[in-house]
Amino acid sequence: MSLRLGVNIDHVATIRNARGASYPEPIRAAELALAAGADGITAHLREDRRHISDTDIDLLSDLCRKRGRPLNLEMAVTEEMVGIAVRHRPYAACLVPERREEVTTEGGLDVLRGLDRVRDAVSALRGAGCRVSLFIEADPAQIAASAEAGAQVVELHTGAFCDSVRAGETERAAAILDRLCAGSVEAGRLGLEVHAGHGIDFATVAPIAAIPQIAELNIGHFLIGEAIFVGLPEAIRRMRQLMEAGRLHTEQAA
């Protein structure tokens, strides 16, 4: 299975909003990312609009439709966000947990506890033609609940694995990677497409890319940070090289 790369451009908007200016423009980052080989664009419209704005979503929706590339709208499970997604009809909608005080998404969505609410949101989004993903931990109970809720995709949270690698916690990283592998197999068994994201950088991407069931990685903060030093196209090209090397290792092992 080929491995796709979705580039999250939220933090271009974070930089813009820090000065209350009109630049840097997320739409320009999206254009550069697609030109450099990104398979799609991800953006997270938060309830408090701390980075991506409604206008950004308008522009990104138009760009992705013109380029024939998917827009993945990350969003909280709220009536407002579902309404926005239904109106814009992005290719994909990824439901994530959201707390106003958090800096970034922390942990996976508790689908099991909020099953009825998540199921309703999934139904509305699928009715609008969106491919629905749930951002979850690689926990069998959450994976099963995601399938029960009617999602087509699960995106497995890779933050703990990436943090462990960076901290030099080899045994913990290996144990978490095993859970990601097992979760990917279980999701595939239930008919769910598997994506992965959160915290991925050059040092951590290859082991995740090597999981054969994973079809897509969504990466944002690291790529935008690396772009400060080498430019966004070069950061994306390097990430793709490492992704492809990780996937090639899997194919050779098979």
Image: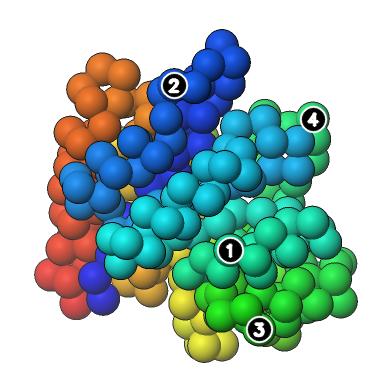
The three-letter amino acid code for the residue at tag 3 is Gly
Q: Dot 1, crowdedness within 10 Å: few (<14), some or many (≥20)?
A: some
Q: Quadrant of residue 127?
A: bottom right
Q: Cα distance, mark 1 to mark 3? A: 13 Å
Q: Which mark is residue 101?
A: 4
Q: CB atoms at circles 4 and 1 under 8 Å apart?
A: no
- Disc 3 vs disc 4: which is toward the camera? 3
The three-letter amino acid code for the residue at tag 1 is His
User: As rendered, which of 218 and 65 lies closer to the eye?
Assistant: 65
Provide the residue designation for mark 3. 127
The three-letter amino acid code for the residue at tag 4 is Glu
Nearer-N-terminus badge (4/1): 1
Q: CB atoms at circles 3 and 4 under 8 Å apart?
A: no
Question: Which percent across, then down, holds residue 90?
Answer: 52, 65
Q: Dot 3, crowdedness within 10 Å: few (<14), some or many (≥20)?
A: few
- Disc 1 vs disc 3: which is toward the camera? 1
User: As rendered, which of 82 and 226 lies closer to the eye?
Assistant: 82
Provide the residue designation for mark 2. 23
Residue sitting at x 73%, y 57%: 81
Residue sitting at x 52%, y 42%: 56
User: As rendered, which of 67 and 73 lies closer to the eye?
Assistant: 67
Q: Which mark is residue 88?
A: 1
**Up/down of 195 relative to 15, above or below:** below
The answer, for residue 127, to whether it is visible in the render is yes
Nearer-N-terminus badge (2/1): 2
